[in-house]
Image (tube, grey):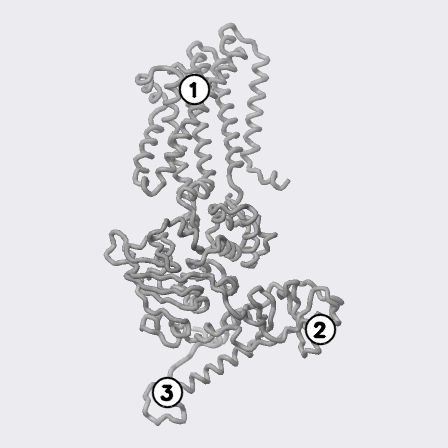
């Protein structure tokens, strides 16, 4: 087996969209005893097969709007269409069975096993046992959990991230065209969150559902959303556009302020790993003779080898010297291995490298198989190119073009006690 | 094996006490001689029917309380009826706060003496723990779990039966166990209104000054209460779904 990955895996040529469009037509939510409407006359068009992220400060009505789509909250006025069908008059239970719903930390039923949780709606729909079992296995595999290990587990015996994955599997159980997610990744640690986000992007790429996701994290919104909807108080639409557009051309001062500091490294959060040239790697299977692996790596001019499992997922990343220390390739699993997906942002990649104290990170495809490595150099190159572009675009005077005495601003002071050990005693 | 080690202390400690007291009483019962009057109450066949009557009183009352209080508790946690909850809990509270003897005697004026009146009195007395625990048990179910159930398309009824009730089971059963234990004790009082129970032994013992009757009645009621408490605990453990602890 000589599987030197030389080129990034080909991107799926055409996407099959199984999602449905969502249209909000003059939707209003007014609570009893409150003068101001929680959501004031909202019109929104969500295309089939897109991920739309609702983002805004708390109290902006983003969750209310999401819950009006599946009528957990009944709109006071207005109509909602899913796939062209007016759902405001449908039986709410039937409607919700055809819409996936994911909440923070999964919202799993604690007294049911993973398989029973996933089968909840198929059972209501009267599917036979065999079909439910097959569907459960397929979904667990899709969300990256081994069916044999996890099907009979109870939610309390799983990590937050795993529970969240099961939550997504359960939402997809009846193959709904639309998936609604209410701050799904709010309760997991940053590294897990990045993995879950990439996993969601991969699932979306494979299934082509329409996904609406509510988040308070603008960076998450730009990463996940094909489009981002920024709301201010009362469900007022500040901007509804592609993330790049929001970052480069904020529509209102509100957006500008909301985007705020996130925009400074904006291109790191909108540029994906797949947009950057990452390097090929030499892979080795567990149990291969060390010598053949070393020869293969040398032929490709590599000094490091990525050990992968049968599915091509990375386990460790030893140097040739390390490989030579054992006669066969070991099945050692490096738990701190930096790994990002092609859909990860450059920001995620930098995080992964810093967390692992490494100068590079491995890049995997939608199924977790390794496709190459990304070095910190490639990332800084991108930053430098971007900076150069920005400089060219800026009209501000430079050292050379400045006319002496035209800007009386005093020298900015940037100072701090830089060595506390020698700081003078008070 | 590791399952056994995780068995809580009350599951194995209580039977030890029960066995010690039970064996002690049995040894005494076998060795002592009874006078004719004592024999009339403490003879094995008489004693058997007295214990039987006591258990029947307790169990019938409990079944009725469960049938009344659990559905009532469920109804009072539904959004439409939630506002009646304080009223219902207060009425149940009065039922329990009123002295049990008084309650039983009052009911005789209305319903006459006998088994049926005793049952009514006991039911009124024991509604509160089950009602309260049903309400508390349903209310402590995580709102987000319920929201998730409704959100993925389970109807309100399905959410109640498949999610809320199983998650509330430990608390509800705890209420049932409390009610049972209260009823075992309170059933002794029904002897005042002409229903046979272990209380009959005690009152006869007091009025005729027969300490053997008095003590037998007291010990047997105590044993019965402990046994029922223990059985209740076992049911509680068995019925608690895996995954909630």
Would you say B89 lies left or right of A355 here?
A: left
Q: Which residue occupies the foreground of this view, B48 or A364?
A: A364
Question: Which residue corresponds to the image point at 68% horizontal and 78% vertical from the top-left?
Answer: A300
Q: Are marks 2 and 1 on the same chain?
A: no
Tag 2, which chain? A
Q: Are marks 1 and 3 on the same chain?
A: no
As drawn, the label of residue A307 is none
Would you say A189 lies left or right of A88 here?
A: right
Residue A157 spot, x, y in % from top left: 55, 50
Question: Which residue corresponds to the image point at 49% horizontal and 83% vertical from the top-left?
Answer: A385
Question: Which residue corresponds to the image point at 49% horizontal and 23% vertical from the top-left?
Answer: B222
Q: Nearer the viewer, mark 2 or mark 1?
A: 2
Q: Which residue is mark 1?
A: B188
Q: Secondary structure at mark 2?
A: helix
Q: Are marks 3 and 2 in contact (CB under 8 Å)?
A: no
Would you say A157 lies left or right of A315 here?
A: left
Tag 1, which chain? B
Q: CA distance from mark 2 to mark 1?
A: 85 Å
Residue A58 seen: no
Tag 3, which chain? A
Residue A53 seen: yes
Q: Which residue is mark 3?
A: A396
Q: Which residue occupies the foreground of this view, A152 or A120?
A: A120
């Amino acid at each position: 087996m000589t599987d030197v990955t030389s080129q990034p895996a080909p991107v799926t040529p055409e996407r099959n969209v199984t999602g449905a469009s969502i249209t909000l037509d003059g939707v209003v939510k007014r609570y009893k005893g409150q003068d101001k409407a929680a959501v004031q006359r909202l019109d929104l068009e969500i295309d089939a097969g897109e991920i739309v992220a609702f983002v805004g400060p708390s109290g902006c009505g983003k969750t209310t709007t999401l819950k009006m789509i599946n009528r957990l909250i009944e709109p006071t006025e207005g109509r909602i269409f899913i796939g062209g069908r007016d759902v405001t008059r449908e039986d709410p239970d039937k409607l919700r069975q055809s819409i996936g719903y994911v909440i923070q930390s999964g919202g799993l039923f604690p007294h049911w096993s993973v398989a029973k949780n996933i089968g909840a709606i198929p059972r209501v729909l009267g599917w036979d046992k065999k079909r439910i079992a097959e569907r459960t296995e397929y979904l667990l595999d899709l969300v990256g959990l081994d069916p044999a290990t996890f099907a009979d587990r109870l939610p309390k015996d799983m990590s937050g991230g795993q529970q969240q994955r099961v939550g997504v599997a359960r939402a997809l159980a009846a193959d709904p065209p639309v998936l609604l997610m209410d701050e799904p990744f709010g309760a997991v640690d940053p590294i897990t969150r990045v993995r879950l986000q990439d996993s969601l992007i991969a699932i979306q790429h494979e299934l082509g559902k329409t996904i609406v996701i509510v988040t308070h994290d603008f960076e998450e919104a730009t990463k996940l959303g094909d489009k981002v909807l920024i709301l201010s108080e009362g469900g007022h639409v500040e901007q509804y556009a592609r993330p790049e557009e929001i970052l480069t051309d904020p529509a209102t001062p509100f957006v500008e302020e909301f985007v705020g500091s996130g925009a400074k490294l904006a291109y790191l959060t909108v540029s994906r790993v797949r947009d950057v040239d990452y390097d090929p790697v030499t892979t080795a299977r567990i149990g291969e003779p060390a010598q053949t692996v070393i020869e293969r790596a040398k032929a490709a001019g590599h000094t490091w080898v990525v050990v992968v499992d049968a599915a091509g997922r990375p386990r460790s990343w030893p140097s040739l010297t390390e490989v030579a220390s054992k006669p066969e390739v070991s099945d050692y699993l490096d738990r701190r291995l930096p790994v990002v997906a092609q859909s990860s942002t450059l920001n995620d990649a930098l995080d992964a490298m810093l967390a692992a104290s490494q100068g590079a990170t491995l890049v995997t495809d939608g199924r977790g198989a390794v496709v190459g490595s990304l070095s910190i150099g490639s990332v800084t190159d991108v930053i430098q190119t971007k900076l150069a572009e920005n400089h060219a675009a800026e009209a501000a005077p430079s050292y050379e073009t400045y006319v002496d005495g035209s800007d009386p601003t005093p020298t900015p002071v940037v100072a701090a006690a830089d060595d506390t050990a020698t700081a003078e005693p008070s | 094996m590791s399952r056994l080690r995780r068995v809580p202390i009350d599951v194995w400690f209580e039977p030890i006490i029960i066995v010690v007291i039970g064996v002690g009483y049995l040894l005494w019962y076998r060795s002592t001689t009874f006078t004719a009057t004592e024999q009339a109450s403490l003879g094995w066949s008489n004693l058997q029917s007295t214990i039987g009557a006591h258990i029947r009183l307790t169990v019938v009352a409990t079944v009725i309380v469960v049938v009344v209080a659990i559905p009532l508790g469920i109804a009072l946690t539904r959004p439409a009826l939630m506002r009646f909850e304080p009223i219902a809990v207060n009425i149940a509270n009065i039922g329990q706060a009123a002295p049990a003897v008084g309650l039983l005697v009052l009911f005789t004026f209305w319903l006459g003496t006998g088994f049926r009146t005793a049952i009514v009195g006991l039911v009124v007395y024991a509604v509160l723990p089950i009602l309260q625990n049903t309400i508390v048990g349903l209310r402590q179910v995580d709102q987000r779990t319920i929201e998730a159930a409704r959100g993925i398309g389970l109807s309100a009824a399905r959410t109640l039966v498949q999610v809320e009730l199983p998650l509330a089971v430990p608390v509800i059963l705890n209420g049932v166990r409390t009610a049972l234990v209260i009823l075992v004790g309170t059933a002794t009082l029904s002897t005042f209104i002409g229903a046979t129970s272990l209380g009959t032994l005690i009152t006869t013992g007091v009025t005729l000054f027969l300490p053997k009757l008095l003590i037998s009645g007291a010990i047997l009621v105590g044993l019965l209460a402990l046994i029922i408490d223990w059985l209740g605990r076992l049911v509680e453990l068995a019925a608690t779904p895996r995954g909630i602890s």
